Image (cartoon, helix red, strand yellow):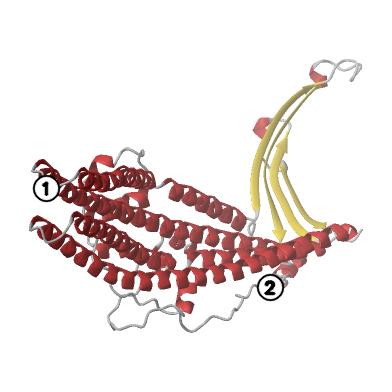
Amino acid sequence: MHKLNVPIATALAIALSACTVGPDFAKPTMPVPERFAQAPAATDATAPMPNAEFWQGFDDPLLARLVDQALSSNHDLRIALARYDHANALLRDAKLDRFPTVTAGATASDALASSDQAPGLARGERRDNSYEAHVAASWELDLFGRVRRGVEAQRAEAWASASDLDAMQVAVVGEVADSYFQMRGLQERLRVARANADNQKETLRLVQARLDAGRGTEFDTSRANAQLEATLSRIPALEAAAAIQMHRIAVLVGDPPEALIAELQKPSALPPLPGEIDAGTPGQLLRRRPDVIAAEHRLHATTAQVGVATADLFPRFTLGGLIGSQAVDSGALFQRDSETHLVALGIDWSFLDVGRVRARIAASRADASGELARYQQSVLLALEDAENALVRYDRTRKEDAHLQQAAADGARAAQLARVRFQAGAADLFEVLDAERTQLQAQDAFADARTRSVSAEVGVYRAMAGGWPDHTPAREAIAGN
């Protein structure tokens, strides 16, 4: 049998090391519009771009503290971080496949054969001692890029996990901010309901006084009381909704549901109407959205896996070696003439099982095709999310302006109606109708203001707020 000279094999490995089978990844292209269809016409040249710490712009120290706590203690983020750590550990493991695997071992044996096994020999002559120590190395000569494609695939998976962590940060911060403002909005609606109830109690007192003076009717008293009770009935539902948001915020920041009730129950005004935001372009959005970036990396990983599967069509060469010492006496180990060594070149080729290999290649290509569709879908969903956030942001601001004026006019009308009623120039129906209109307008305005602020948060969340440029996970992978 012809023996392959090991230096020649090594030189051949070096010469062919640039050969990597399978498709090279290329970022897919998709038609992307130059601008957002629903972006409001900019009137302020200094409008800010979405930035990482958008919550600081609301000038609310409590919100800022809650966000910081969520970023350090949220359990969904801890899960995402653990998945990233897992993927990065697998990347380090895959990279070690590019180098020889070195092991060491030692054995010491004392064997005694029976007199039947060695008839005629004395007991000492039937004893056999053996001592051995060795260091062995095994190295796959990556002639066709199987190992390199494996490292490429695992690196892409680690990048995808880092992007998942980015996406979870965006989602958690957005949900904390949105839940916080939803709670503040409910507290404002509670204030409106209670203030209107106080006004209606005063109206009922006036109606009751007129009845006691013989100038009113039971009908008027019943109508005034019915409206008061209807207003009071709003309060329990609003209190429950506000408490639910408090529980949600506590869990988001890693606390038990009841932990923040005492602190969050202290009312605080909603921030002013949001200003303009420069949404940038769809192209900038796609470079910033971590879910799109994660889909791209997973497509890269499955493309590299096609190369891993394709490499099995070619022979796999393994270079092995061993250096050691063997002796019948422990004192003779590592002495002259006790050394042992072995150098071997192994060849493993699955050409006789090519049907299975081609089936695995087809499965890898199908995975890549599915990830391509997933990437394209993530692009469309990101654009849809951004367009929805922008149109909601623009329209709620306009709605807010109208309802703010309606609330002011409703309050003025109710005040005038009560003055006219006390002067005898208006009947009770006008007062009750004005008070009902006032409550509806003020409640609608508080709800619209809440949705306006939530819509601003939604824009920052849809635009991903610049997170991918500032995450520790990405810096860690870049160092690998």
Q: Is 305 drawn above or below residue 82 in the view shown?
A: below
Q: Amino acid at mark 1?
A: Arg
Specify the quadrant of the image occupied by residue 50: bottom left
Q: Residue at x 41, y 61 (%)?
A: 471
Q: Which residue is mark 1?
A: 215
Relative placement, left or right, of 350 versus 367 is right
Q: Residue at x 26, y 56 (%)?
A: 436
Residue 9 in sight: yes
Query: Label 1: how many residues lie within 10 Å, few (<14), some (14-19) or many (20+)?
Result: few
Helix, strand or loop at label 1? It is: loop
Residue 334 in sight: no
Query: Label 2: how many residues lie within 10 Å, few (<14), some (14-19) or many (20+)?
Result: few
Outermost residue toward the front in this view: 214
Relative placement, left or right, of 293 versus 373 is left
Quadrant including the N terminus: bottom right
Q: Position of residue 190 (x, y in %)?
A: 26, 49
Relative placement, left or right, of 363 versus 462 is right
Tell me the distance, in whole angstroms, between the alpha carbons under discs 1 and 2. 103 Å
Q: Amino acid at mark 2?
A: Ala
Q: Which mark is residue 18?
A: 2
Tell which circle, 1 or 2, labels the residue nearer the N-terminal end.
Answer: 2
Relative placement, left or right, of 204 versus 55 is left
Q: Is 39 drawn above or below residue 3 in the view shown?
A: below
Q: Position of residue 254 (x, y in %)?
A: 37, 43
Q: Residue at x 77, y 23 (%)?
A: 111
Q: Position of residue 24 (x, y in %)?
A: 67, 73
Specify the quadrant of the image occupied by residue 378: bottom right
Q: Position of residue 344 (x, y in %)?
A: 78, 54
Q: Residue at x 85, y 16 (%)?
A: 114
Specify the quadrant of the image occupied by residue 459: bottom left
